[in-house]
Amino acid sequence: MSVIEPGGTIGIIGGGQLARMMALEARRMGYRIGVLDPDREGPAAQVADFCIEGEFADRTAAEALAARSDVITIDTEHVPAEVLEWLETMKPVRPAASILRIVQDRCVQRRFLESQGAPQPKYALVLDAKSLREAAAIVGFPCVLKTRQSGYDGKGQVKIDRMEDLDDAWGAIDYRPAILEAFIHFGKEISVLLARDLSGNMRFYPIAENLHRHHVLHTTQAPAPTLSAALWAEAEALGAGIASALGHVGMMAVELFVTQEGGLLVNEIAPRPHNSGHYTFGACATSQFEQHIRAICGLALGAPSLLRPAVMINLFGDLWRDGLPDWHTVLSHPSARLHLYGKQRPLPGRKMGHILILDNENGQSALEIAETIDRVGY
Ligand SMILES: Nc1ncnc2c1ncn2[C@@H]1O[C@H](COP(=O)(O)OP(=O)(O)OP(=O)(O)O)[C@@H](O)[C@H]1O
Ligand SMILES: [Mg+2]
């Protein structure tokens, strides 16, 4: 079992905000960080020791990263699995290529979940116009059409309310291979955030409740305020079963719907730190980013304990519409912490950063403070 001691080099494929926060935590622990990304000014490249400029599918660039790294990890699951498979012949790759093969295709992921007996929305595969109709007959309306590959932040998915809209919806995702899922009128959305080490030990973070707007995560509250102890345990058991079956090493998030009847359905698996776990960076004894680094380097896992209840609000590019957002108002709340990812262009819908808010010492809850910040529109 290969352990990478502090002082070693971690190579990350993808240079977005997850890689940036991994790099910040890893550097604090004395690791060196290399990033492979097409943008050498991107969020992670700005804080890495070195950046190799290249596309994820560029084998020369990937080999150059591996040559200088002791272990390879990922910022996104949309790294070609064959590139990771090939890197596995050179260096430890965590999570393994075999896991990415499963999660990067929504249909393969759903079949894997089925094989594990995990509860999930009804779904069917869409390859052509005929199978689209058959899928609608199986799944019913409303439903959501999602591309099999490359979806993130709600991109590549369309909600469909009526049979007449089927063709347009498929056109809206460029007639790509897709899955059609039943639209779930869920009571709430939660995520199980866990870490699994090389020996199979696991640590669970407090389950978070997530609020999405337009299919994109907006706010996370931890711990999930109104989850029963029984559902909490059931959700953790589901997450643990999935992580073990995959033989995962590192952080993992399992996004779940809690149905109005009080059941759980798996939405999707992310084998890496996750947006709904950003709250751990400041609100927990060990952040999800440090935890991921510990796991992939073969170190003992850290305590996931919550220091104080927290709310995380994502900051989208839209907030820059009229110039710089008013950070002074945000920061005038002593328990609010600003995280910006160093992205140069604040495009609408683009995740630029987040604010973490903790319950304050005067008994004001993070949620109340978040609402005041939200009201002034920061
Ligand atoms: N079957 C469904 N029923 C109801 N809502 C859904 C369904 N599928 C997706 N959504 C809504 O859209 C959100 C994003 O969906 P999903 O997680 O599949 O997409 P994604 O593009 O992978 O998003 P991300 O990368 O942000 O997690 C969900 O969190 C949920 O709010
Ligand atoms: Mg999701």
Image (cartoon, rainbow, N blue to C red):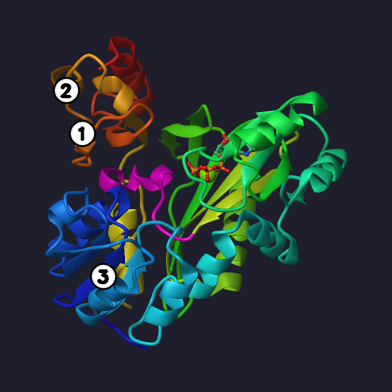
At label 3, counting other C-alpha atoms closer than 10 Å, the crowd grade (few under 14, some 14-19, many 20 or more) is: many
Q: Quadrant of residue 61?
A: bottom left
Asked if residue 81 lies left or right of residue 4, the reply is right
Location of mark 2 (residue): 327
Report ligand 1 position as a quadrant.
Answer: top right
Residue 333 in view, yes or no: yes
What is the distance, in whole Å, between disc 1 and disc 2 at their CAs? 8 Å
Q: Quadrant of residue 112?
A: bottom right
What is the distance, in whole Å, between disc 1 and disc 3 at their CAs? 26 Å
First in residue order: circle 1 vs circle 3: 3
Q: Nearer the viewer, mark 1 or mark 3?
A: 3
Location of mark 3 (residue): 11
Mark 1 touches mark 2? (CB < 8 Å): yes
Query: x, y percentage for residue 340?
Result: 21, 37
Q: Residue at x 62, y 54 (%)?
A: 106
Query: x, y percentage for residue 43?
Result: 22, 48
